[in-house]
Amino acid sequence: MTRYCDVPERPGDESGRTTGGGRAGTLGTLTIGQSPRQDLIPELRMAMGFEPGEGAGTSRRLRIIEAGALDGLTLEEVRRFGPEPGDYVLVTRMADGSSVKIAERHILPRMRSQIDRLVTDGADVIALVCTGEFPEFPCEKLLVRPQRVLHHVVMALAEGRRCGVLLPDEDQKPQGYRRWSSVCGSGGLEDQKLLRIEAASPYGDPAIVQEAAVALRDWGAELVVMDCIGYTMAMKETVKSITGAPVILARSILGRVLAELV
């Protein structure tokens, strides 16, 4: 199901004109789980520069269209998408707030279909709100892939530093080491001099994130990457406080890039 959310545009300057000029466009967001993502969209729009209540009364709006690859499915149906050995593992959120673990291959056709729907519904830019690695999707509009954005940001900062990465699930660690080793200068799972990955679900007990942060602190992390859109700004502050290291949060990095595009 596609859902809509109108967000007030960025506030104007003293002359009453809105900053940036022109009418805001339409952003389409595609989660690999179910929409709406009430845990995500408010913080995403804040990262884009929209504060709650700002711009009230203006005719200029940002229109957000939400869609999910698992929209319309029951939990029992989604459980059939569970990963098997060798699958690329994804962790996402259902509409009721619960988390599920799925294999990427099961949802790719549904993602393609929802991208087409977002284009039809008027999206100017589409953001995948997942940091997983996905194949190319044909799309006539600009398609933003958070994993690629995150990789390039970390690549610019991580050289020679001990980089800690948080992922949602233990089963994601092997694929996490494969994709982050080249970015962080590590030789992979057996070489943890410059790269350490800890698993901590953003959808469960907050204490798990705290424990993972302690492990990264004790390892000596000099930079921490929270590699899941599900991690919140509050979780980032917790990790930063515990580790004492700079923390890169996937959802805020995505929001800042989208602010340039929409």
Image: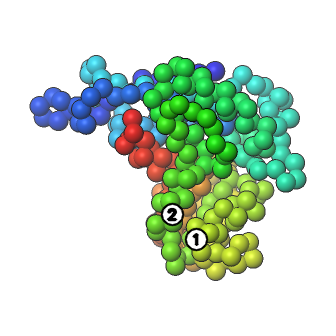
Identify the residue at horizontal 36%, vertical 33% (top origin): 52
Residue 140 location, x and y as percent? 53, 31
The quarter of the image holding the N terminus is top right
Amino acid type, residue under disc 2 in the picture: Val
Image coordinates for residue 220, horizontal then vertical, percent: 57, 77
User: Residue 124 shows which numbered tag?
Assistant: none
Is disc 1 in contact with disc 2, using a CB cutoff of under 8 Å?
A: yes
Examine the image and state in which quarter residue 53 appears. Answer: top left
Callout 1: few (<14), some (14-19), or many (20+) C-alpha neighbours within 10 Å? Answer: many
Q: Which residue is mark 2?
A: 154
- In the rendered structure, the answer to whether residue 169 lies left or right of residue 206 reads right
- N-terminal of the two: label 1 or label 2? 2
Q: Which residue is mark 1?
A: 184
Which one is in front, 190 or 111? 111
Location of residue 223 with respect to 86 vertically, above or below: below
**Mark 2, secondary structure of its residue:** helix
174 or 123, which is in the foreground?
A: 123
Q: Quadrant of the C terminus?
A: top left
Q: Which residue is painted at 43% across and 41% down in the image? A: 258
Residue furthest out toward the left = 15
Seen in the image, is 69 located left or right of residue 229?
right
Q: Position of residue 11 (x, y in %)?
A: 25, 33
Query: What is the basis of the colouring in this image?
Result: rainbow
Q: Position of residue 76 (x, y in %)?
A: 84, 29
Asked whether residue 34 appears in the rendered view, the answer is no
Whole-angstrom CA distance, mark 1 to mark 2, is 8 Å
